[in-house]
Amino acid sequence: MGLGFLRLRQPPLVGFILAGVALGPTGFGFIADSANVTLLAEMGVIVLLFFIGMELSIRAFILSLRQALLVAGGQIGVSVGVALLIAAISGKPLAEGLILGFVVALSSTVVAMKMLDDRGALRSETGRIAVGVLIAQDIAVVPMLILVTSLGGADSGEIGVLQIAVKMLLAIGLLGGLLWWLGRRGKLRLPFSEAIEDKVEILALGALAVCFSAAALSGIAGMSPAYGAFLAGIVIGNSTLRSRVIPVIEPIQSVLLVAFFLSIGLLIDLTFMAEHLFLVLSLAIVVIAAKTVLNIALLRRTGSPPQVALVAGLSMSQIGEFSFVLAAAGLSAGALDLDAYRIAIAVTALSLLVSPLWVSIMHRLDGLAAEHRESYRHAFAIAYARELAEVSRGGAALLGIGRALRVRYRALRLARQHRRERADGE
């Protein structure tokens, strides 16, 4: 499926998601239990944050930190405000509106980074700003999870605002302190670095051990495991082993990310989506379009140039992988009913599926809009001329095969009829 979409010059990750749909319980049913794939997907997210931390430029990240916090805060504030307003108007519990606001506010680090990397923008100013916003969102997941867990009522007296504030301050303080410390010194020289720098297997195992150990410690402390992996990646990225570790870890990360996209497809319930197709599709389109407009507006408001704001805003237009975790936490706490949970999962999965195609279309149309084409229909036809040509050639080839088969069939039928007439004559 990935190769097929690549042939059509579309993001291959869409093919990975559709492969998960086909293999899943409501598809052909080859994978009935998605637990093992989900575990690999979670590992993929952790390794991705570790990899991003290794490639992060501390100086560039510090420069974008203020903007990242403002944009992430604006995304969460607007999403939660709109969700609470809709809940109040429709008579739904405000706790449900709050959770759905959190779910919609988050963007996918995995999908956004993959799309930016495919377009060669990950290491540019656009990538730096997008990474900053996404990391700020990942840090915000910590208080979101604590708050969502407390909404069920059982632990609301034990988990209060003070504990949320303490964990939030701890997460920001650790990141800030680490960046300050590493920014004041040169490259770190890790123990045994000279002995292992040419040992590929030891570099791979050692880097993964550091990654998952930091993720485990972060999870035990009540924060996101991906946050701990990100901090570990920053440390390795500012060591003398950075250039050796990155090419070793990258293939492992790529394989695990494919498992992540596969797991998204496994979560898509085709039966439920068929029953609520219009609702789910409408919500997914509205959310993607609204998030795109909001992201671009916030980025422009905080000082980004138009083109940077467009690309970064489009890359963050989908709903994120941590939204699955928040929705599941809300369902477990009893603050989110089953129907709302299933709609949230379906819309999130569909937004992740559609987002790469949305970005591709908007990029092409935006490029052609500058040339003052006659209409969007004309621009669309020009933008996808190559793909339409591929489809046309494929259709022409199929028509040619069809005609050849029909001619062959008629020739065989005439030959059989001729033999039958000769046999009757004899």
Image (cartoon, rainbow, N blue to C red):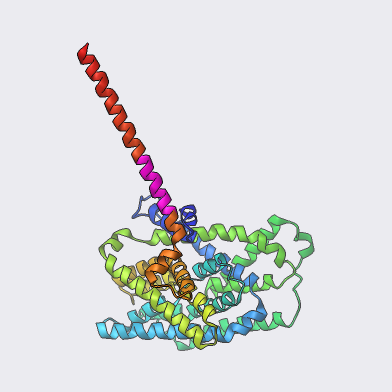
- The quarter of the displayed image where residue 249 is located: bottom right
- The quarter of the displayed image where residue 337 is located: bottom left
- Eyeballing the image, is 333 above or below 397? below
- Eyeballing the image, is 200 above or below 291? above
What is the x, y in percent for residue 48? 57, 66
Does residue 136 appear in the picture of this structure?
no
Which quadrant is the C terminus positioned in?
top left
Does residue 188 appear in the picture of this structure?
yes
Identify the residue at image location x=59%, y=66%: 212
What is the x, y in percent for residue 285? 36, 72
Q: Is residue 302 magenta?
A: no
- The quarter of the displayed image where residue 253 is located: bottom right
- Eyeballing the image, is 331 above or below 260? below
Locate residue 119 relative to residue 100 in the image: left or right.
Answer: right
Locate residue 42 relative to residue 409 in the image: left or right.
Answer: right
Q: Who is closer to the viewer here, 365 or 280? A: 365
Q: Residue furthest left?
A: 424
Identify the residue at image location x=43%, y=86%: 77
Identify the residue at image location x=46%, y=86%: 74
Q: Residue furthest right?
A: 194
Q: Residue furthest top?
A: 426
Locate residue 346 relative to residue 145 in the image: left or right.
Answer: left
Number of labelled discs? 0
Q: Who is closer to the viewer here, 154 or 425? A: 425
Q: Who is closer to the viewer here, 127 or 265? A: 127
The part of the chain drawn in magenta is 390-402
What is the x, y in percent for residue 338? 30, 69
What is the x, y in percent for residue 94? 32, 84
The secondary structure that most of the magenta stretch takes on is: helix
